[in-house]
Image (cartoon, rainbow, N blue to C red):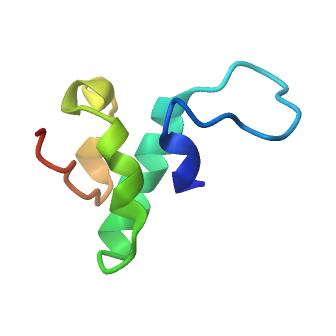
Amino acid sequence: MAQFADPKREWPYKQIHSPNRNELGELLLRAAAEYPESKLKDGLKFYKAGDFAGSSARLYLKMAQLPAAK
């Protein structure tokens, strides 16, 4: 799923409702925290810190840090 974090990459399957990229981003943050050696963080480069500012899950779930902006 991380490959679809890129907003330029289209979802190849039937879309039932409007996609919410931030939901995918939160899942990537959670998974990257548990599997830091994986390539999951590659998908996080498409997000900025403000994308998750309103997420209450960040208060009680272990999450990875977003890569530093370049």
Residue placed most toward the observer, 2 or 51: 2
Q: Is residue 68 left or right of residue 23?
A: left
Query: Residue 66, how many percent across, how many down?
Result: 22, 48
Q: Residue furthest top?
A: 18
Residue 50 vs 38, above or below: the answer is above
Q: Residue furthest bottom?
A: 37
Residue 26 found in image quarter: top left
Residue placed most toward the observer, 24 or 68: 68
Residue placed most toward the observer, 33 or 41: 41
Residue ID at (85%, 26%): 16
Residue 38 found in image quarter: bottom left
Q: Quadrant of the N terminus?
A: bottom right
Residue ID at (39%, 70%): 39
Q: Is residue 56 left or right of residue 69?
A: right
Q: Quadrant of the C terminus?
A: top left
Residue 61 found in image quarter: bottom left
Q: Residue furthest front?
A: 8
Query: Residue 32, how many percent across, how many down?
Result: 36, 65
> Total label count?
0
Residue ID at (52%, 54%): 2
Residue 33 vs 2, above or below: the answer is below
Query: Residue 48, how many percent across, how many down?
Result: 24, 32
Q: Residue furthest right?
A: 14
